[in-house]
Structures are given as structure tokens and as C-alpha cells.
Image (cartoon, helix red, strand yellow):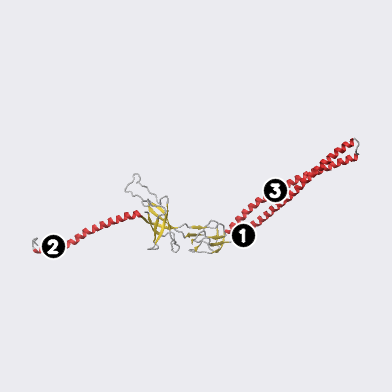
């Protein structure tokens, strides 16, 4: 077909008319794509200025591993797995008979020691009364001895000049010996009374120390008796129960776990995201379990160490390409609302969005 022919020109015109829409599309699509990319970049920059988001986040809780403080056999059990419990609620009962016997024995020994102590106090009062009387007896015997001694020398001198008889002198001598004997006896009685008083005071002190020791033993026995009733230290849900009625449990060996209701979130942000984060910032929380539902939270704290270790520079003599590892920093987030009506348990995946400005 000749180029200048009528049919050639009409055919070429038809071909060109079909190419124009296609050529337009080839131009418009890249332009629109570029515009969308630029808008997305601008939005990303603005969004990152006000928010930092991560989907590397999970619900956590301080799980309590409950252990008995004494050993014994479980005689009553009031919970099962997934049972909700309140703080102070009775969970189980350990057989208390042996521990009650220990309390009774400690009480009996303490009562005896207290009776002995009171008896020692009474004895001290009696001995003090005797000592007081003995001192009076000494004063009286001393006066009699002084009088007898004076009387003896008076009769002795009178006997020399013949004023009294030998019998009068002998009577004076005898009276002096009796007075001296009574005085010495009164002194010995005071000495014995003082010795007995010291011994009784020592006994009283010993009983007082014994009372303190027995009181401590009674307190320990009563405390062990109280430990036979196992109670929940916190509000939460029972998990990992491994005891039944009749099970022998050992001191400090966990028998179940309690997951508290006050869960929190650990969100791992990239090291490049935490520059403007600080305590108190508000957080939007989305949990995979509850699609379309958002929860309110608050940034509680930022861990002072990263969750991963990585070199910032390639090792010496490294061969091939080197990829820098971006470290993650754990951030603790708490809920601002009551979540007890939701099944939010440790391990659930979370998307956390922190408003940094």
C-alpha cells in the first residue's frame, strides 16, 4: 500500500487515534503514583512527629506463684483453674491439728513460767519483810549487847572494890555472852536472808527471760497455725493448680499461680522511636482479640536497657555486606480504664500508639 494513498492515510489515522488513550495512561499512572508516594511520605513524617507505633507489644502481668509457708496435708480446697478470687479470699486449708497442739503446748509452758515468775515475786516480797524484821532484830540485839557490855564492866569494877558479889559478876558475864550470841545470830539471819533474796531475784530474772522466750515460741506456733489457712494475696485468676484434697504440700513449693487483674503492656519500640517518649504520655491500645476496639493507656516507664544487643559497625575484616541491627527498647504501658470485663490475659498481641507531641 502506498503511503500517499487514501487508504493508507485512513488506516494510519485509526492507529494513531487508538494509541493516544494508551499513551495518556502511561503518563498519568506514574504521575499519580508519584503524587501518592509524596503524599504518603508527607503524612508519614507528620504522623511520626505526633505518634510512634509498634505492633511488637504484648500483654503482661506480675504472676504470683503461691506457696504454703508450712508443710502439711490439704484437707479443704475452695478453688479450681480459672477461678476468680478476691484479695484475702480463702483458697485452701492445711490440716491444723499438729499446729494447734503446738500452740496448746506453748501456752501451757508459758502459763507455768508466768506462775513461777509470780511466785518469785511473792517470795521476794516475803524475804524483804523478813529482812526488814531481821534488821530490826539486829538493832535490838546491838542495843542489848551494848547494855550488857556496859553492865559487865560496871560489875567487874564493883567486884574489885567489893561492892558486889561474885554471883553478881557472873550474872553480868552471862548476860553479856547471851547478848553477844543474839547479836551474832541476828547478823547470820540477815546474811542468810540477803543470800536468799539474791537467789530469788536471780530466779525471777531467769523466769522473766524464759517468759520472753516462751512468748516468742507461742507467737511462732500461732503464726504457723494461721498459715494453715491459705489466702489469696491479690485479686486475680487461678491458673496452674497442681493440688487436690489429700495432697501433701511442702513449705515454699508452689501449688498454683494467680494472674492479677491489673495487667499491663510491654511494647518494644525501635531505638529511633523513643527520643521524644516520656512518662505520662497517652497511648492508644489495640488488642488483636478485640477487633475495632481501642483502649486508653499511659506510658508508665522506659526500660533503661535495650531488648537486643547489636554492633553499630561491621567487624574488622568483615567479608560481604553488613546489615545494622536496629535495637528494640521495652516500654511499659498501663491501662487507664477498668478491663475486668474483658478477657485480657498475658500473652495477647497488642498494637500500641504513643502520642509523643
Could you say whether the residue bearing mark 1 is in a helix, strand or loop?
helix
- The residue pinned by badge 2 equals 13
Q: Residue furthest top?
A: 161
In the rendered image, residue 207, in percent from the top left (x then y), is placed at 67, 51
- The residue pinned by badge 3 equals 201
Q: Are marks 1 and 2 in contact (CB under 8 Å)?
A: no
Q: Quadrant of residue 36?
A: bottom left
Asked whether, in this view, residue 86 is left or right of residue 182, the answer is: left
Residue drawn at the location 63% of the way across and 52% of the way down: 212
The disc, 2 or 3, on the residue closer to the chain's N-terminal end is 2
Q: Quadrant of residue 334?
A: bottom left
- 263 or 171, nearer to the observer: 171
Residue drawn at the location 67% of the way across and 54% of the way down: 114
- 213 or 193, nearer to the observer: 193
Mark 2: few/some/many CA within 10 Å (<14, 14-19, 20+) = few
In the rendered image, residue 10, in percent from the top left (x then y), is placed at 11, 64
Q: Is residue 276 above or below residue 243?
A: above
Q: CA distance from mark 2 to mark 3?
A: 134 Å
Q: Point out the image quarter for the N terminus.
A: bottom left
Could you say whether the residue bearing mark 3 is in a helix, strand or loop?
helix
- The residue pinned by badge 1 equals 100
Q: Report the disc number at residue 118.
A: none
Amino acid at each position: 500500500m502506498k503511503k500517499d494513498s487514501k487508504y493508507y492515510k485512513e488506516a494510519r489515522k485509526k492507529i494513531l487515534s487508538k494509541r493516544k488513550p494508551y499513551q495518556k495512561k502511561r503518563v498519568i499512572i506514574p504521575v499519580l503514583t508519584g503524587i501518592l508516594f509524596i503524599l504518603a511520605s508527607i503524612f508519614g513524617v507528620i504522623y511520626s512527629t505526633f505518634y510512634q507505633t509498634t505492633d511488637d507489644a504484648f500483654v503482661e502481668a506480675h504472676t504470683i506463684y503461691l506457696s504454703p509457708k508450712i508443710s502439711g496435708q490439704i484437707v479443704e480446697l475452695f478453688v479450681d483453674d480459672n477461678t476468680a478470687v478476691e484479695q484475702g479470699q480463702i483458697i485452701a486449708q492445711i490440716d491444723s491439728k499438729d499446729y494447734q497442739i503446738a500452740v496448746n503446748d506453748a501456752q501451757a509452758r508459758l502459763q507455768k513460767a508466768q506462775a513461777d515468775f509470780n511466785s518469785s515475786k511473792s517470795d521476794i516480797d516475803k524475804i524483804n519483810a523478813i529482812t526488814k524484821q531481821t534488821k530490826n532484830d539486829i538493832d535490838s540485839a546491838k542495843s542489848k549487847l551494848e547494855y550488857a557490855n556496859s553492865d559487865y564492866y560496871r560489875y567487874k569494877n564493883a567486884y574489885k572494890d567489893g561492892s558486889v558479889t561474885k554471883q553478881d559478876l557472873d550474872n553480868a558475864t552471862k548476860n553479856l555472852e547471851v547478848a553477844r550470841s543474839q547479836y551474832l545470830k541476828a547478823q547470820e539471819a540477815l546474811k542468810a536472808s540477803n543470800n536468799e533474796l539474791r537467789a530469788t531475784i536471780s530466779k525471777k530474772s531467769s523466769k522473766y527471760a524464759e517468759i520472753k522466750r516462751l512468748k516468742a515460741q507461742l507467737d511462732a506456733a500461732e503464726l504457723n497455725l494461721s498459715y494453715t489457712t491459705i489466702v489469696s494475696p491479690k485479686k486475680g485468676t487461678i491458673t496452674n493448680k497442681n493440688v487436690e484434697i489429700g495432697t501433701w504440700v511442702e513449705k515454699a513449693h508452689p501449688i498454683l499461680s494467680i494472674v492479677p487483674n491489673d495487667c499491663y503492656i510491654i511494647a518494644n519500640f525501635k531505638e529511633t522511636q523513643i527520643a521524644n517518649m516520656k512518662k505520662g504520655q497517652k497511648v492508644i491500645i489495640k488488642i488483636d482479640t478485640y477487633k475495632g476496639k481501642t483502649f486508653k493507656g499511659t506510658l508508665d516507664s522506659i526500660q533503661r536497657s535495650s531488648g537486643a544487643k547489636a554492633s553499630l559497625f561491621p567487624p574488622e575484616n568483615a567479608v560481604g555486606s553488613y546489615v545494622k541491627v536496629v535495637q528494640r527498647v521495652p516500654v511499659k504501658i498501663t491501662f487507664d480504664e477498668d478491663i475486668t470485663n474483658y478477657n485480657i490475659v498475658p500473652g495477647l498481641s497488642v498494637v500500641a500508639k504513643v502520642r509523643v507531641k
